[in-house]
């Protein structure tokens, strides 16, 4: 199972890194722009009259602040997920060692003495 | 898949909001029911939300030369049923709309519909179908998460094509245009999401079989 999981992680890393190594498709305005922003550009290009009728209440004042908040989002998610998996792993290991017959024998000896 | 703030005409924005509303109500009731019936699985429910939180924060490059992000909503959908993901996904989208100016309040309904409703329901449907057909668990999990991810981006493309049909080629022309922006870019990312979801399910089977049994998830599958 451990090997399968390592292979899965390796595959994810290869798929994520491959586009950075492969030659870029031609005709890009900006390499690796966000798809959301591209869609926005496509809307504005095809509908020059369209005016967004609402603007964000607050925008991160700089790219740094934006990356801070994105990192915070990822860290919160990964932190909780890691806490959960670590907790359950610890529980399952303790159960396993409690069920270990050698240890049960040792406990029985302790109790007798 | 985030439609930017103000980028859906008011009527469309309102219609998608209305369409999402019943799913949100159903989702909230489902969250209450799950936490009452399976108090042990509360932390797993939070972790499924956390998975969506991480994955939707990661902008990953794609072979099309642009970047996009996975959604992470398939995991919770196959564990807890698709309804709860409307609520968990909405929390993620609200965080991004308020703090990151990513998506928006006026487009929240539309974005909830694609990421927190359509994606999870497709994932759940694919998973049930794969289990009924009797394929291996990992294949079902992979297909569910990957196709749910793709479905989200297809729905976003449909939403934009409905709002901004091409003057010449109409709805279908616009769908092709937005689809090539979103759906093509998303294919490798959907594969990544599928693989990562299989990884997490593997870890759950290994360390958290009790929680899975509580939810009657994939009974009998052990590592």
Image (spheres, rainbow, N blue to C red):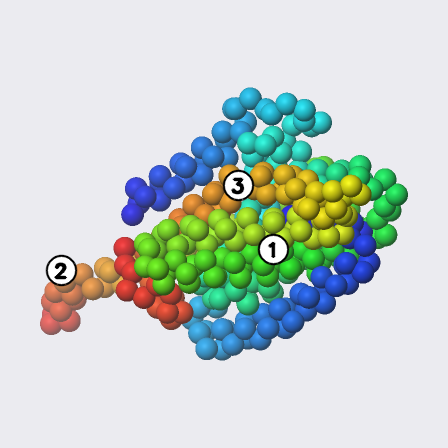
Q: Residue under circle 1?
A: B115
- Quadrant for the C terminus of chain A in the image: bottom left
> In whole angstroms, how far apart are the C-alphas of marks 2 and 3?
52 Å
Evaluate whether residue A74 shows in this view.
no
Q: For numbered disc 2, what is the local secondary structure?
A: helix
Between disc 1 and disc 2, the foreground one is 1
Residue A80 point in image, percent of width and height: 50, 55
Callout 2 and callout 3 share a chain: no
Q: For numbered disc 1, what is the local secondary structure?
A: helix
> In whole angstroms, how far apart are the C-alphas of marks 3 and 1?
16 Å
Q: Chain of mark 1?
A: B
Going 60% across and 46% down the picture, which residue do you hit?
Answer: B57
What mark, if any, has residue B187 been given in the picture? 3
Residue B139 point in image, percent of width and height: 37, 51
Q: Residue under circle 2?
A: A102
Evaluate whether residue B30 shows in this view.
yes
Query: Does residue B31 lie above or below A92 as drawn?
Result: below
> In whole angstroms, how far apart are the C-alphas of marks 1 and 2?
51 Å
Going 69% across and 53% down the picture, which residue do you hit?
Answer: B159
Between residues B191 and A83, which one lies in front from this camera angle?
A: B191
């Amino acid at each position: 199972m451990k090997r399968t999981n390592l292979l899965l992680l390796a595959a994810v890393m290869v798929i994520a890194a491959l586009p950075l190594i492969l030659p870029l498709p031609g005709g890009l305005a900006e390499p690796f722009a966000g798809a959301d922003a591209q869609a926005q550009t496509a809307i504005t290009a095809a509908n020059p009259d369209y005016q967004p009728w609402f603007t964000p209440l607050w925008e991160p004042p700089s790219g740094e602040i934006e990356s801070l908040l994105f990192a915070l989002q990822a860290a919160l998610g990964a932190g909780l997920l890691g806490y959960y998996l670590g907790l359950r792993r610890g529980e399952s290991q303790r159960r396993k060692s409690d069920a270990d017959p050698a240890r049960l024998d040792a406990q029985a000896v302790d109790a007798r003495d | 898949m985030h439609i930017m703030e103000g980028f859906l005409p008011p009527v469309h924005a309102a219609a998608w909001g209305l369409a999402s509303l019943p799913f949100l109500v159903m989702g909230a009731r489902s969250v209450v029911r799950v936490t009452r019936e399976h108090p042990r699985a509360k932390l797993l429910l939070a972790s499924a939300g956390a998975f969506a939180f991480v994955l939707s924060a990661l902008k990953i490059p794609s072979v099309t030369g642009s970047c996009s992000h996975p959604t992470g909503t398939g995991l919770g959908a196959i564990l807890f049923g698709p309804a709860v993901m409307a609520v968990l996904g909405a929390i993620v989208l609200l965080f991004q709309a308020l703090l990151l100016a990513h998506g928006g309040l006026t487009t929240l309904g539309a974005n909830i519909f694609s990421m927190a409703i359509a994606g999870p329901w497709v994932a759940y449907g694919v998973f049930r179908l794969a289990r009924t057909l009797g394929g291996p668990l990992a294949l079902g999990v992979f297909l569910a998460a990957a196709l749910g991810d793709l479905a989200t981006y297809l729905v976003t493309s449909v939403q934009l094509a409905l709002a901004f049909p091409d003057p010449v080629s109409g709805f279908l022309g616009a769908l092709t245009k937005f689809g090539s922006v979103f759906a093509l870019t998303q294919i490798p990312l959907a594969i990544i999401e599928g693989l990562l979801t299989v990884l997490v399910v593997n870890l759950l089977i290994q360390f958290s079989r009790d929680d899975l049994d509580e939810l009657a998830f994939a009974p009998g599958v052990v590592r």
